[in-house]
Amino acid sequence: MTQKKMALIATKGTLDWAYPPFILASTAASLGYEVQIFFTFYGLQLLRKDISHLKISPLANPAMPMPVPMPVLVQGLPGMEAMATMMMKNKMKSKGVASLEDLRNVCIETDVKFIGCQMTVDLFEFSKDDFIAQTQFGGAAMFLGFAGDADISLFI
């Protein structure tokens, strides 16, 4: 029997969108899947050495539960993003949700491959030194070579 494969594409770089690729990848790898995540555009933020700065925005996020109903105008006020980020981090900590750093480390420990999109690195003029050592760089064709044989492919 061949090893199952899961291919993920991570395109978002906010706190709330950082959890799904790391949770799914670490879970699949723990179940014996071979896993690759292709980080492109804003998803590259998840491979930066320091990810503690990631934020969440209540603006244009109508599904985000707020303690009290807030009009859209209030959500756009200065300081609301910082407040929403603090509230989310506190809620996650109180519920025992692993930190992003911990989830990313579990992915590393379970041999999840992190592919940083070379085109996006060039586009945004990033330095490869900005990223964790476990980042491999490649293009869509490299990732599609893996994804084409994957049992599960997800775009996040």
Image (cartoon, rainbow, N blue to C red):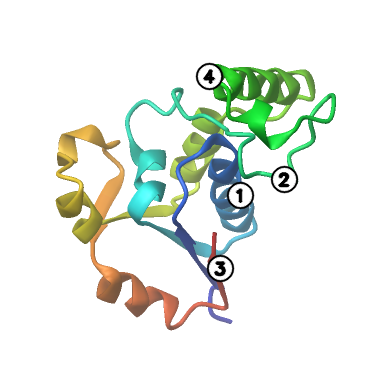
Q: Dividing the picture into quarters, in which one does residue 132 lie?
A: top left
State which tag comes first along the sequence, 4 or 1. Answer: 1
Tell me the CA gap for discs 2 and 3: 23 Å
Q: Which residue is mark 1?
A: 20
Q: Residue at x 56, y 64 (%)?
A: 33
Q: Residue at x 57, y 78 (%)?
A: 151
Q: Residues within 10 Å of mark 3 (few under 14, many from 20)?
A: few
Tell me the CA gap for discs 4 and 1: 28 Å
Count of number-bearing discs: 4
State which tag comes first along the sequence, 4 or 2. Answer: 2
Residue, far front: 73
Q: Amino acid at mark 2?
A: Pro
Q: Which residue is mark 3?
A: 154
State which tag comes first along the sequence, 1 or 2. Answer: 1
Are circles 4 and 2 on residues that touch, CB within 8 Å? no
Disc 3 secondary structure class? strand
Q: Quadrant of the N terminus?
A: bottom right
Q: Amino acid at mark 1?
A: Pro
Disc 4 secondary structure class? loop
Disc 1 secondary structure class? helix
Are circles 2 and 3 on residues that touch, CB within 8 Å? no
Q: Which residue is mark 2?
A: 62
Q: Dividing the picture into quarters, in which one does residue 25 lie?
A: bottom right
Q: Which residue is mark 4?
A: 78
